[in-house]
Amino acid sequence: MAPGSPEGQDHVEPQAPNASSETKVTPKSKCCKWTGQPGWWQGSADGAMQASWRLWALVAICVADTFRDEAERIMRDTPVVDGHNDLPWQLLKRFNNELRRDGANLSVLQGTHTSIPKLRAGFVGAQFWSAYTPCDTQNKDAVRRALEQIDVIHRMCQLYPETFACVTSSAGIQEAFRQGRVASLIGVEGGHAVDSSLGVLRAFHRLGVRYLTLTHSCNTPWADNWLVDAGKDEVQSHGLSDFGKRVVQELNRLGIMVDLAHVSMATMRAALDHSRAPVIFSHSSAYSLCAHRRNVPDDVLHLVNKTGSLVMVNFYTSYISCGEAATLGQVADHLDHIKRVAGAGAVGFGGDFDGVSSLPVGLEDVSKYPDLVAELLRRKWTEVEVRGALADNLLRVFRAVEQWSNVFLPPGERSHADT
């Protein structure tokens, strides 16, 4: 949805983190060292009680640090693959996509959820960058606007080659991991950006696009969006039209992941039924915990399990708590729920950083991922499950999409919705 919309959805101005988080990320201190002096508490019952409380506090801090240390150990080998980040949208809004302008340096960028130091501190090893164009560009200049956002993502890789590696495959992600760079992939957010043309979709594939969100917060002529379920838009395709099914077929042929964030529940079910390859929800959460229509209901989570698909949890406060505030623990609740209903292989991270106005306490920017992983470990997630949520689940889905693809198969001749 466009900035400032009454729905308060994605792509609104992010709150600037506080000054201290802009300049550095303070590592967790090492503890578990007894610093009291012998007999310091002796001489009164009150002193003994104080000693007991201080000891328990020390134990709690030590346990917390143990989980954080374990999270960092795991993330050094298996860094985060995040499904959705709107930094390119911020670069457009703030700098007109002029990356060499004063203030646009990603190494010292201020007032955003994302910068190079924050990505490093958060152990982000792969990022799907959103090439987003607002719904009001539909049937106007959506294709051009999407191309400009694709271009700025490529230019990020060119300007910061020591940090970003633009890749287009699961193997490319793993190679970037080995190089210590952030694998940078492109997702086009909103099917209106292809202007109901499979020819445009094929051109996007050649430019490196590797997922397409079938709708944003507006219907396309061939797919319905989530506002239909909220009673704020008209039912049009009852999920997917015949041409919408051809879009899914072409995405499968090309090896572009089908993304069901933002679509209606009927569209979710139709796409899961029609796609030969697993699909993703690049930034959606659990409807059972927050009854927002942008989230995924349990019956669809069962289909996610059946098809080997993936839900990458969105951190936007309104999708986590359905209120004005949320916590890191509530995000972990969504991850727990999806794991319980759809299986550990169905869980991922899709923070929606730099596309939302409010984030949970403890997840204020991309540097905070180790704290979330530490919370999952605290909840007794196994190391295999954690590595799955971090990267392995997405890599599995991506490989399956690649295996289903066949770009050598001739595309259909009927490439436009009105043919």
Image (cartoon, rainbow, N blue to C red):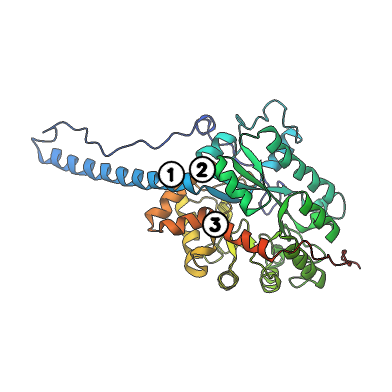
Residue flagged by tag 2: what amino acid is it? Phe
* Alpha-carbon span between mark 2 and mark 1: 8 Å
In the current view of this chain or complex, which residue is farthest to the right? 419
Q: Are marks 1 and 3 in contact (CB under 8 Å)?
A: no
- Residue ID for mark 3: 348
In the current view of this chain or complex, which residue is farthest to the top? 102
Horizontal arrangement in the rendering, residue 30 relative to residue 361 (left or right): left
The residue at 65%/35% (across/down) is 161
* Alpha-carbon span between mark 3 and mark 2: 15 Å
Report which quarter residue 177 is drawn in.
top right
Residue 309 in view of the camera: yes
Residue mark closest to the camera, 1 vs 3: 1
Residue flagged by tag 3: what amino acid is it? Gly
Mark 1 vs 3, N-terminal side = 1
Horizontal arrangement in the rendering, residue 138 relative to residue 370 (left or right): right
Q: Position of residue 303 (x, y in %)?
A: 59, 72
Q: Nearer the viewer, residue 361 or 396?
A: 396
- Residue ID for mark 1: 72
Q: Which quarter shows the C terminus?
A: bottom right
Q: Mark 1 falls on what kind of element?
A: helix
- Residue ID for mark 2: 123
Q: Are marks 2 and 1 in contact (CB under 8 Å)?
A: yes
Q: Position of residue 389 (x, y in %)?
A: 51, 56
Characterize the local packing of mark 1: few (<14), some (14-19) or many (20 or more) Cα atoms within 10 angstroms: many
Characterize the local packing of mark 3: few (<14), some (14-19) or many (20 or more) Cα atoms within 10 angstroms: many
Please tell me whether residue 93 is drawn above or below residue 221 in the rendered image: above
Mark 2 vs 1, N-terminal side = 1
